[in-house]
């Protein structure tokens, strides 16, 4: 289970002039009751974990259905109890493959409305398409908030070189730390006095900082253009830390990843990896690549739009390792690849930040 962070990331700055129309901005009633459904693995509840870890002050409790084996270690309560504690929204904290609202959740959504809570969803299923839900929300005077809704009229990618600097987090698979790594890097840079923004590319990141573009909901022809809008022209010494999505090695989501790589034009990348994962988590017949192979593929893809793209570090999820195992993993990997290694929740980021900032 992922630990609770004591210091949340500062909110990202307002998007650069001219890009506001290309950002999905969410205004939600806080705090949240985090809905876990029947999740039985932390990767299925990554939205809930992300909000608990990076916006703990906005989370009043959790609500689990029968069969749920995941816990956020927050108070368990139903919508009526949460409303009595001051909650403003029931937030779907589950992120299943395909992003569809499960029929088993629908009574819970109606219960949230009946308790006077807004319903906040990062699913691909628009809440208003669930029969009766919009009418119930209107009658109760609450809102249905869909976060996974990209802005209209996104442009196609141009490949034009933009001012400012960018780092993109990439991965050997999904759900292994790209968002956490990006948030931690943005925070570490700001603490060192570097002008930096976290740029959210998924529903959880958007909920944490309030704006971004949900890349996996963008029509394919416009994915690179959306990524360009996500990290617009900036001052020469400004860094945009762009949250990665999917993986080039995922049979379903590689296309989302590639559009984000091309459009963000990263000057630097950090590769995220779970050292105990041997196969793509949702596709067991697809093995995870070696770090060396992953680095080669990501650099080749990135250098289409930024010939100077470089890999600057390896971010490991070492939550299942002890201190001795972690130290050996880092030492062996640094010896093999010549790149600094870190765990964004457990170790210092100083070495990777120094590598980032080195010209």
Image (cartoon, rainbow, N blue to C red):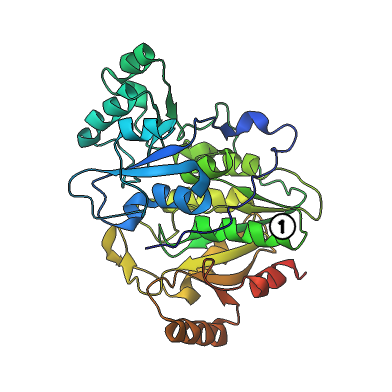
Q: Nearer the viewer, residue 298 or 211?
A: 211
Q: Is residue 306 visible?
A: yes
- In the drawing, does residue 110 fall left or right of residue 193? left
Give the quarter of the figure containing the N terminus. bottom left
**Residue at screen point 47% across, 47% down:** 51
**Residue at screen point 36% across, 18% down:** 137
Q: Residues within 10 Å of mark 1 (few under 14, many from 20)?
A: some
- In the drawing, does residue 161 fall left or right of residue 88? right
Q: Nearer the viewer, residue 61 or 103?
A: 61
Q: Disc 1 on helix, strand or loop?
A: helix
Give the quarter of the image for residue 216. Answer: top left
Total marks placed: 1
Give the quarter of the image for residue 246. Answer: bottom left
Q: Which residue is mark 1?
A: 190
Q: Nearer the viewer, residue 275 or 249?
A: 275
Residue 3 x/y as whole percent: 44, 62
- In the drawing, does residue 315 fall left or right of residue 281? right
- Where 226 falls versus 348 (above or below)? above
Q: Residue furthest front?
A: 84
Give the quarter of the image for residue 113. Answer: top left
């Amino acid at each position: 289970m992922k630990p609770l962070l004591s210091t949340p990331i500062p909110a990202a700055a307002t998007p650069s002039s001219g890009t506001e129309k290309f950002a999905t901005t969410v205004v939600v009633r806080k705090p949240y009751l985090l809905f876990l459904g029947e999740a039985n693995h932390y990767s299925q509840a990554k939205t809930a974990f992300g909000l608990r870890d990076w916006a703990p002050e906005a989370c009043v409790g959790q609500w689990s259905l029968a069969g749920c084996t995941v816990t956020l270690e927050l108070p368990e309560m139903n919508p009526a109890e949460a409303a009595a504690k001051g909650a403003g929204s029931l937030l779907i904290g589950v992120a299943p493959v395909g992003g569809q609202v499960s029929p088993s959740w629908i009574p819970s959504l109606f219960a949230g409305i009946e308790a006077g809570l807004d319903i906040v969803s990062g699913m691909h299923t628009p809440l208003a398409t669930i029969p009766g839900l919009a009418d119930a929300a209107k009658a109760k005077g609450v809102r249905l908030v869909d976060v996974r809704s990209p802005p209209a009229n996104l442009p196609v990618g141009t490949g034009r070189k933009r001012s400012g600097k960018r780092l993109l987090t990439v991965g050997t698979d999904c759900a292994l730390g790209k968002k956490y790594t990006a948030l931690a890097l943005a925070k570490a840079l700001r603490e060192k006095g570097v002008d930096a923004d976290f740029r959210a590319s998924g529903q959880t990141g958007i909920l944490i900082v309030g704006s971004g573009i949900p890349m996996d909901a963008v029509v394919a022809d416009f994915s690179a253009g959306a990524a360009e809008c996500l990290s617009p022209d900036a001052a020469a010494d400004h860094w945009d830390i762009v949250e990665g999505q999917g993986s080039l090695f995922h049979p379903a989501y590689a296309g989302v990843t590639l559009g984000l790589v091309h459009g963000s034009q990263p000057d630097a990348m950090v590769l995220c990896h779970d050292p105990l994962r041997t196969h793509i988590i949702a596709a067991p017949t697809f093995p995870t690549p070696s770090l060396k192979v992953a680095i080669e593929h990501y650099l080749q893809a990135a250098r289409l739009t930024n010939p100077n793209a470089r890999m600057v570090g390896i971010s490991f999820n070492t939550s299942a390792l002890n201190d001795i195992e972690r130290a050996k993993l880092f030492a062996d990997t640094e010896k093999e690849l010549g790149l600094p290694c870190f765990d964004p929740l457990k170790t210092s980021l100083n070495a990777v930040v120094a590598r980032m900032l080195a010209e």
